[in-house]
Image (cartoon, helix red, strand yellow):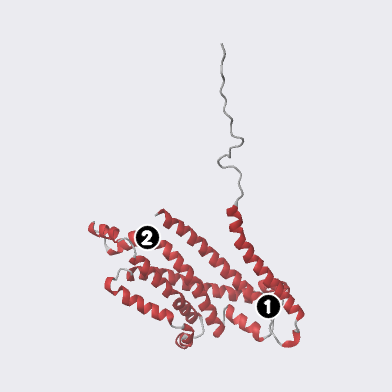
Amino acid sequence: MSSTVTTSAAPASTPRAGGSRPRKGLHRSSTPLLIRYGTLAAVVVLWELLVRMGDSSGGLLVAAPTEVLTALPGVIEDSAVMSALGTGLVQYLAAMAVIIVLGVAVGMLFGQLGAMFEPVRNVLQLAFAVPQVAISPLFIVWLGVGFASKFTYGITQGIIPVLIGMMTAAKLVDRSVLDSARSMGASSSWRLRNVVLPAVVPDAVSNIRIASKLCLLGILQAELMVSTAGIGSVIRQLSTTFQPDRLYATVLLVCVAAVLINSALGWCETRASKWRGHQ
């Protein structure tokens, strides 16, 4: 009696699911960061070399990056500079509060105008296309050189993009949902709060981020033109007294504050975009 055993050759190697593979996505995500910060480092180094090799007696208001960093602690410790920076921040936050509340609320209302939607949007787009720097002296004539003029100018710079964006977002809300709420007796204010507002939150955050940049630029521009207090007056004073190291250090502080604000709003925008995906 004989027995026959049949064997089959097992595969030499079978790749396991989830095995170690080259993480190509990691390299792809790190490449833009390397390019960005590498370019920034190259610009700083080139800036340092050009200033060191140049003639410092030429009357140019230029300071090397190392001189700026050396002057930075003194600028931070200067109570006048920090007070002026705080004044500008208060103006910016106050203007942004008005932009967010009025821009979002009025924009949602304009989105429900029906036949008047297109004419109102065209007027706002025309107003946004007008270079407001040409009419900025009027704000000084009407409101003076204090808080009110810069506050109002910052609002006018940032509120129009929010209005246009919120109008469009509110217009695109699913009409069947609004009709269902209306048929169940929901008032217009209830529909705006509980139907339109949740639907337009991602668009609102994106528009607020755009408005934030325009508002900040508007306030800084107004302060640089004429100001008795605020960071713009400090920058103007440092430039007229030929203190380039402190001037660039002050500008660096303003840039850092702007980057922090923009990064915070960018984080909110990313979170809101994920919310849009789950809706």
Mark 1, secondary structure of its residue: helix
Q: Is residue 179 above or below residue 13?
A: below
The disc labelled 2 sits on which kind of residue?
Ala
List x then y, in percent, for residue 182. Answer: 25, 60
Q: Can you see residue 227?
A: no
In this view, 195 is above or below 137: above
Q: Nearer the viewer, residue 150 or 108?
A: 108
SS at badge 2: helix
Q: Say few, some or many: other residues with alpha carbon within 10 Å of mark 1 (under 14 / 14 to 19 / 20 or more).
A: many
User: Of label 2 and label 1, which has the lower sequence position?
Assistant: 2
* Residue 180 appears anywhere in the view: yes
- Looking at the image, do the residues carrying marks 2 and 1 touch, with CB atoms under 8 Å apart? no
Q: Which residue is mark 1?
A: 246
Q: Which mark is residue 150?
A: none
Distance of label 2 from label 1 (alpha carbons): 47 Å
Quarter of the image where one finds residue 85:
bottom right
Asked which quadrant contains residue 163, the reply is: bottom left
Residue that protrudes farthest toward the top in the picture: 1
Residue at 73% over, 78% down = 50
Residue 190: horizontal and vertical position, in percent? 30, 61
**Mark 1 belongs to which amino acid?**
Arg
Quarter of the picture containing the N terminus is: top right
Disc number for residue 199? 2
Q: Residue furthest front?
A: 1
**Closer to the observer: label 2 or label 1?**
2
Q: Position of 26 compared to 45: left or right?
A: left
